[in-house]
Image (cartoon, rainbow, N blue to C red):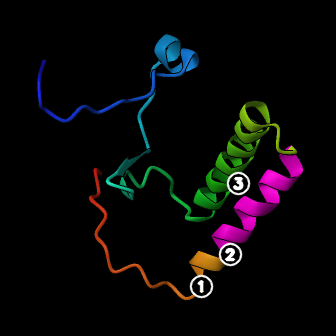
Amino acid sequence: MSDKPQFHELAVPPDVAEKGGHEVLRASVVEGEVSIALRRSFDDPFTWGVLFSDLARHAARVYALETGIDEAEALAQIRAGFEADVEPPDDSGSTPSLN
């Protein structure tokens, strides 16, 4: 048995395993804090908004499937959390760019 910390990563999505691609975002929880690495990947920052919206819908769907909370309610709570945290920007952390 090892005392080395373990990283529990997600599997690569089936379409990526089949067709390839490149990872744009990796988010992990370390000691209760979110750790993020990202690659710019898009010419227009607007596309990140579309990605965040898609992530929110997927997360709401997972909450609905795993907890029984209504998907619309989960999405509303996700949106409220985003709006509460995005203005004003007070995160002084660092984000490694993998470009």
For the residue labelled by badge 1, is the local secondary structure a helix, a strand or a loop? loop
Asked if the residues shown at circle 3 and circle 1 are in contact, with their CB atoms under 8 angstroms apart, the answer is: no
Tell me the kind of residue under disc 2: Glu
The residue under the point 32% across, 54% down is 31
Return the x and y of residue 92 as percentages of the image width and height. 33, 80
Asked if the residues shown at circle 2 and circle 3 are in contact, with their CB atoms under 8 angstroms apart, the answer is: no
Separation (CA) of disc 1 from disc 2: 7 Å
Tell me the kind of residue under disc 3: Ser
The answer to which quarter of the image holds residue 63 is: top right
Q: Earlier in the sequence, mark 2 or mark 3?
A: 3
Asked if the residues shown at circle 1 and circle 2 are in contact, with their CB atoms under 8 angstroms apart, the answer is: yes
What residue range appears in magenta?
71-83
Mark number displayed over residue 87: 1
The residue under the point 26% across, 59% down is 96
Return the x and y of residue 44 as percentages of the image width and height. 56, 62
Mark number displayed over residue 83: 2
Separation (CA) of disc 3 from disc 1: 17 Å
